Amino acid sequence: MKAEQYYTDDDRPSRESRNRMWAVISRSTGQSRILFAVQDSRSFFAGMAAAVLLLLSGTGIYFLANQFVESRQPNEVRFDDAYRSAIKEFEDVLPSPVQVTSVETNGGRLQSRIQQLALIDDAITELRVGIDQMDVSPLKRSRLRQLYSMKLLVLQDIIQQGDTEL
Amino acid sequence: MRHTFETQNFMNDELPLIQRSRSGDHQAFRILYEAHVDSLYRFLKQFSKNHHDVEEWVQRTFIKAFERLDSFQGRSRFSSWIFSIGLNEMRSDQRRTTILQFEPVDMGADIPLDDTADTFQWNELMRDWLAQLDEVKRAVFLLHEIEGYSHGEIAGMLNIQESTSRTILTRTKQWLRDQWNQERKEVG
């Protein structure tokens, strides 16, 4: 049976009824969805901005705190740090000892330099075990500085002799 | 209306409007409303003699549909989705107001299904008898026989099994026909 045959005129909504229903629907839905979308995007951007600000301030606080701690250290400790930093820079640009030892060396000179470095490293490690970061005992500090200086010289020599390819 | 081709075309036509409505385009939703309001209204009108009740159900249906547009997957016809919301609104109101001005009619669940139910012939007298049935039986009959929905779609709308929908329809037709036969006997 067709719907047109079954339903009577009384079953159909009048034009007024349709408009009245739409007015209610429109009022209930019109603003809410748009408002929700706007609020949604606002929350998203606010969240993003807050995250960026938090990251920037976190980084800033970290650097400030680091600078503060460093400035409070005794000169002796800062001097050691400078040495270690220089050594680290050298070591970073040189191939690791394992790679170097596998390469054909110039008359065994490089091999001997690597052995020297290993001995200096052992001595530094041994000395640092008994020395606190803030320990400024002149004798220990002086010995440590000599070892650092020696290690730097050995590294410098390796680079200057062209024993390894950088 | 029960055919896949028509369903597919119908959905293709409406999908852009649904997409636009999702992003808050009120004009697009107005077009969807105009396309479905008459069929939903006349269907729901079969469950109440009061125009205000029906208007209320229709309004709530479209408001809920708008709010839940994101959950419409497009796997069914938009009209069947709207009808299922409308049915829920009507049924929850009916339950709240205790319902049914009519006692549900026992159609004899133990009576074997009549294979000749397909030869069913509609008669205007049946309209009143149909009104005596409970809302689910009435809904199944109207949705299948008048609105042209498949049993699969009806099952989705009423949250019942497809086979249950078939059984309800067959029994309803059988019951209407029995009523008709009895009426003829009495007149004759």
Image (tube, coloured by chain):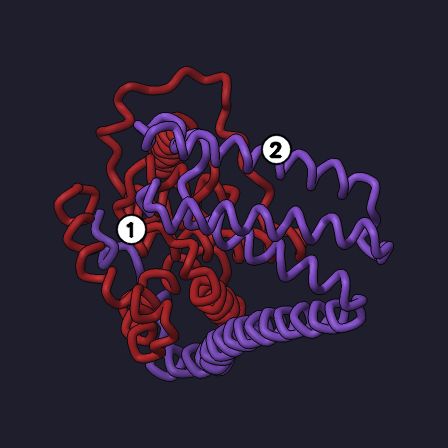
Of residues B71 and B180, the one nearer the viewer is: B71
Image mark 1: chain:
B
Q: Residue at x 45, y 39 (%)?
A: B137
Decide: is B104 above or below B79.
above
Q: Which mark is residue B77?
A: 1
Quarter residue A57 falls in:
bottom right
- Please tell me which residue lies in front, A37 or A55: A55
The residue that appears at 36% across and 71% down in the rendered structure is B23
Q: Are marks 2 and 1 on the same chain?
A: no
Mark 1 is surrounded, within 10 Å at the Cα level, by few (under 14), some (14 to 19) or many (20 or more) other residues, namely many
Is there any visible trace of residue A11 in the rendered image? yes
Circles 2 and 1: CB atoms closer than 8 Å: no
Q: Colour of chain B?
A: red
Type of amino acid at the residue the image marks with label 1 = Arg
Residue B101 placement, left or right of B6: right
Q: Residue at coordinates 37% horizontally, 67% vertically from top-left?
A: B22
Q: What color is chain A drawn in?
A: purple
